[in-house]
Image: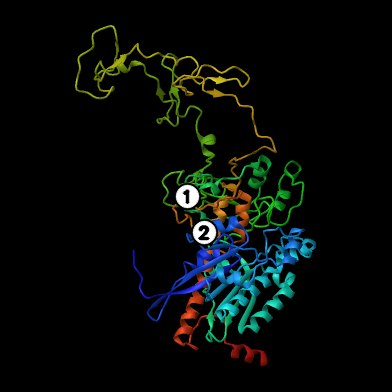
Amino acid sequence: MQVLENINYKTVACLFGGIGGGSAGLLKSQVEYGGNVYRYKLLCSIDSDPIACTNHDLITGEQKAVVMDLFRRWQYIDWHGHEPTDDWREMTPWDIWKAFGYQVPSYLFSSPPCKGLSGLLPQGKASSKKYQALNYLTLSGLELALEACEQYGKSVPAVIQLENVPRITSRGKSLLKQIKQLLVKYGYVVSIRADHNLGEIGGLGQNRVRFLIMARHEEQMPNVIYYPERKPLRSIGDVLESLPTPGDMVAGGPLHRLPRLQWKTWMRLSLIPPGGDWRDLNKVDYQNLRVVHEPRSGAFEVADWNKSSRAVTSTAGPGRSNGVTAISDPRLNISGEGKTNILRIQRVTEPSVCVTGAAGPNQGATCISDPRVNTKLHPDSYGVQDWDRTAKTIRSANRIMQAAGSISDPRIADRPGRYTDKFRMQDASEPAGTVTGVTDVQSGAQLLADPRIKSTPRADTMGVQGWDHVGKTVIGSADVHAAAAAVADPRIPADNEQGVWIIIAQDGTWHRPLTTYELAMLQSFPTHLPDGRPFQLVGCSDAKAREYIGNAVPRDAAIEMGNVVLLAIAHAEAGIGFEMTWNQVWIAPLEEIESVVVH
């Protein structure tokens, strides 16, 4: 293991850190500049959910999560619908300062709750007092953090970043105006955009468009922050290919369990083409397989293995989400190598497909439906005549494919020039013939009529027992080849019966739900926890685990965003205010922004 020297650690704190997608990524960020290696030291991750905090420390391997409810009193009442409990109190800047370890972080990363700002929530609910109180955390959490840093640390973070859903630009317009005013008041240059694709930033297997605020403190960092390099999106198959088989909870952990869906749901998934959703069921026999309700767009969507995934959302099932939750998995090898010529039968009336070097029909060598066998061959072609019957008429044909030119000759043992022991079957009750050095029954190696092996299997072999009969005695060698070890099972699944079934779709793949473990991998969480176990979350249901994962900042995107902030901090320490580069600027110097506005 390489030991790095001259490491310059920069502090980072996370507000509303959840299960630690952002924290895990920032802890992996690293840049080298001026002979030094720059990394982050995590001060804390604040969240009101104790289970999320437990899993944050489980995933990051650091005990830095702090359970803290950042609601103001009025927010608590509006959200919960009642007065706070006796043990609840409103947090103060001093509480934040203690959580920060009594120091001002270099980088403050905030990912406040987005449920009330998301398009998944109906407008009526989003406008209610309950969700307006939740939305206000985007501003109140930031206010508390800045007050704590200024009041007790006499400074503020050099960089502040806030992540949320794009719909915040409409549903949280007034909040954004207040946030910008707050940041400008503290001396920040602010970039507010809702077109950041974290999938491209992190090179993920999903499209994940998000809203980001990036604020650079002008006094501490007069130089620019560059935008992360955009990477090509990966397909879902690229991410899932190396993972354990779905349902393998030994290798993939408890989150890799396939959900038990109703039989009719499995049928529906198998009928939906890759990239389609429930609306495609109208193109099949909808009288028998119609969807009786109209979920939002994307429900029952089957993702294409070779394309990038849609954004991972926090809902728990394929019928209740507008995010992708199922995939057409080609790894059943139904199509072998994927060649379309395997066992291909060509029409004789059409041009041939491309001739390849395949050696057999199972490898792609094509076959043909040749009509000439039925139209030009004589009925006696390849005929084998019976020894005991009169021969057919002798004609001029001299090949077996043109006439019945073969016979079943019984004189195999009497032909001149052959040994008499060929195919000899000896009697077990008589002395054996002379043992010779031959090894083949056709050359004289003798056979024996052994009476110790019965000519018929024992009773009950291949036995199929009736479902409503008493079972036969279970023996130690119970097997369909040795006992009545089969049963006539009448339990064909009912439409609403839940289970895990493999139904091969028309494209030769298994249209199945993505497991929670696979959704975590699409969010670029590590395959294994620091303690060596497969990635998993503790203390919550599978549905809640999906919510945590869907709400998380993708780890690989956080790595890249953390890298550009580290580089900007390194440039600021080195006094680099300007340099020639092709890199895209995220936040330009204040003078440049003002000049653009003036002109």
Camera sees residue 70? yes
* Residue type, label 2: Asp
Tell me which numbered mark, 1 or 2, is placed earlier along the sequence. Answer: 2
Color style of the picture: rainbow
Quadrant in which the C terminus appears: bottom right
SS category of the residue bearing label 2: helix
- 29 vs 316, left or right, is left
> On the image, which quarter does residue 313 sit in?
bottom right
Locate residue 417, reporting x and y percent: 24, 20
Q: CA distance from mark 1 to mark 2?
A: 43 Å
253 to 310, vertically: above or below: above
Q: Which residue corresponds to mark 1?
A: 337
Q: Which residue corresponds to mark 2?
A: 57
Locate residue 465, reporting x and y percent: 57, 20
Locate residue 392, reporting x and y percent: 46, 20
Camera sees residue 306? no
Depth check, front residue: 278 or 381: 278
Locate residue 227, reporting x and y percent: 54, 77
- 531 vs 515, left or right, is left
- 121 vs 416, left or right, is right
> On the image, which quarter does residue 404 sit in?
top left
State the residue at coordinates (57%, 63%): 66
SS category of the residue bearing label 1: loop
